[in-house]
Image (cartoon, grey):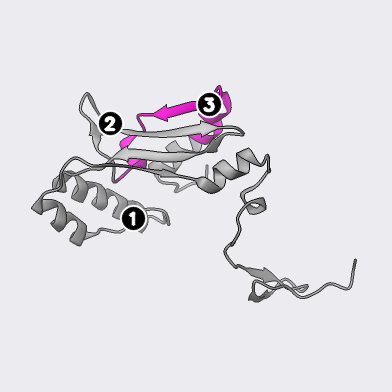
Amino acid sequence: IEEGTVWPRIVDELLKQFVRPTLVQPTFVIDYPVELSPLAKRKADDPTHVERFQPIVGRLIELGNAFTELNDPMDQLARFEDQQKDRDAGDEEAMPIDIDYVTALMYGMPPTGGVGIGIDRLVMLLADQPTLRDVILFPAMRRLPTDDGQPGVEGTAKASSEP
């Protein structure tokens, strides 16, 4: 772990390096630390964790992500402020403060939950493919390097004379 890494990234890296390799498949990973889920509701019996789960299957693939939405505007604002501190410290994944969202929460939001399922990951498992790239029908176009290592045209690379 690099110096200057913020706490949420450290926790996430520890989970990936030490917890996931020990999982017996399939597994539901539950009760994530609050620092990893800034939009999820805290557990009533343990406010250091949130009501969140991820089904892990196959080759340690996250098949989905689900959580109870945080609907407390003051808690949400405090978490956004923590995220902003992490962002200012260099964490590119940290969310900026969304004051419009906090204002909307102040008007009231009923208890809500949601789940996101990685259909592409499910297809990868069912098709027994090693990577998502093998099953995505319309992959994102990225700049590919040319032979001299410079960025090329989006989605293309300079043809090589080698077979």
Q: Mark 2, residues whose alpha carbon is within 10 Å: few (<14), some, or many (≥20)? A: few
Residue 132 vs 126, above or below: the answer is below
Instruction: From the viewer's perspective, tell me whether residue 32 is left or right of residue 13.
Output: left
Label 1 amino acid?
A: Met
Q: Which residue corresponds to mark 1?
A: 95
Label 2 amino acid?
A: Thr
In primary-sequence order, the first of circles 2 and 3 is 3
Residue 72 vs 95, above or below: the answer is above
Point out which mark residue 26 bears.
3
Instruction: From the viewer's perspective, tell me whether residue 156 is left or right of residue 66.
Output: right
Q: Which residue corresponds to mark 2?
A: 48
Label 3 amino acid?
A: Pro
**Image coords of residue 51 (percent x, y):** 30, 33
In primary-sequence order, the first of circles 1 and 3 is 3
Q: Is residue 138 magenta?
A: no
Residue 102 vs 15, above or below: the answer is below
**Image coords of residue 29 (percent x, y):** 43, 29
Look at 59% across and 44% down and name the residue there: 123
Q: Mark 1, residues whose alpha carbon is within 10 Å: few (<14), some, or many (≥20)? A: some
Front residue (pair 80, 56): 56
